[in-house]
Amino acid sequence: MRSALIYLVLLAAGIAGILWVAQLGGAVEIRLGDAEVLVGLPVALLLLAALFLVLHLILAFLGALRRLPGRLRDRKAARRRGEGDAALTRALVALAAGTPDAARLEVKRARKGLGDTPQTLLLAAEAERLAGREEAATAVFRQLATMPDARFLGLRGLLRQAIQREDWPTAQRLAREAEAAQPGAAWLREERETLALRMRDWREALTLAPPGAGQAALALAAAGQEPDATRAAELERQGFAADPAFAPAALAHAKRLKEGGSPRRARTVLEQAWTARPHPDLAIAYLAEDEDALARMKSAEILVKGQPRHAESRLLVGRAALEAGLTGRSRQELDALVASGTADRRAYLALSDLEEVEHGETPEGRAAQARWLRQAATAAPEPRWRCTACGTDHAAWEPVCPKCQAVGTINWTSPQTLPATVG
């Protein structure tokens, strides 16, 4: 309403102006050579307005002619974009339906209408892969990788192809480049960790692994690959710190400390590892320098102080006491171990040896020995390093099973057999 009032006021003002000019009178003289034309002022103004309108129409027409090719190109491009979008949709449907020939045809039309955009190139690569044309797909993925805004898409496609053909060095390189192009992708970090394990690149696997017990094994494996002694020692220390219960890391760290002139620190490491999880290899290393049987007995008591009732602790002290001739202490520990229900074959064999020491070749001694040997035959076997993938037993821990090449599957396990009974 307000706008209409404004227009009416302007119209009234314009008409009033025209009437005022008409009342003024006057004429306009136009000379063309010897000819003279005298025109009234209102008529002259009307002619001037008409001339202005004609010139405006001529300029508008010329402008429209000048813009016509561009409009035609825009209209054609819009039509092609519409056709390309439709083809893109049909290509997606064809890929979902698993029809590679139809997908390749529709992608070709989409690229013709939309050009080589990241979307069309990605669909083109997937269509080529679906059709079994891996080389053609590789070429498209490489083209994608050259685009700054689509580099990650191209690298991911190339990475997937490298993994499928088990080209692990190339896959590891591509994974690094992809993470650099798209930092923070959790799945890519996991993929890099898997590739590092396949490549036996323990240092990189350790860097990529999440916090957990597995870091101890990776740190120890990385130390074995490290040529620099200082770095190797730091990796062994890191492995022990990550999991003191992992005996191989504790043994390696203690050995390095001992060789470096710190035997007391080495013994402390072994004691801490025993407290975390007793292991017979820790006892072997701890008692290695004790030549006297009584000295070994005392060292054994010091070692097991953190876990005195553990099965390994009782077995160690019982064996050490038997070697030192302390048969009463030996029987005390071994009987307690059998009564706990956690004894394995080693405990019954130790009791058999104890009967021989105490009773000798007497009928009573032979009967007792035979009783413990029968118990040993049905007791649980002693723990050992075993590959959980193929079931192979190993003398020591290794990062890779030599038989089945599985990574991280060798664990300290106790095989289950028939339970032993005390008789």
Image: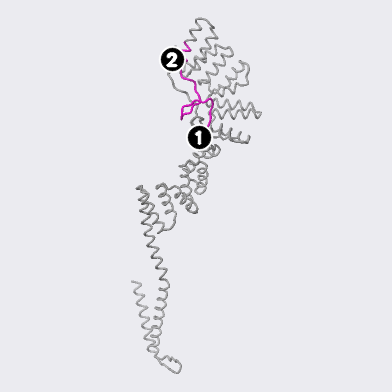
Of 136 and 300, the residue lying toward us = 136
Q: Position of residue 215 (x, y in %)?
A: 53, 34
Quarter of the picture containing the N terminus is bottom left
Residue visible at 56% across and 24% down in the picture: 282
Given the image, on which type of amino acid does mark 2 rest?
Thr
- The residues colored magenta run 371-399
Looking at marks 2 and 1 on the same chain, the residue that comes earlier in the sequence is marked by 1
Of 5 and 54, the residue lying toward us = 54
Residue wearing tag 1: 212
Query: How many numbered discs?
Result: 2
In screen coordinates, is 329 left or right of 92? Answer: right
Q: Is residue 34 magenta?
A: no
Quarter of the picture containing the C terminus is top left
Which residue is outermost to the right? 261
Q: Position of residue 415 (x, y in %)?
A: 46, 23
In screen coordinates, is 124 left or right of 361? Answer: left
Query: Judging from the image, what secondary structure is the residue with disc 1 in?
Result: loop
Q: Which mark is residue 1?
A: none
Q: Which mark is residue 421?
A: 2
Q: Is residue 377 magenta?
A: yes
Mark 2–mark 1 CB contact (< 8 Å): no
Of 12 and 38, the residue lying toward us = 38
Label 2 neighbour load within 10 Å: few <14, some 14-19, many 20+: few
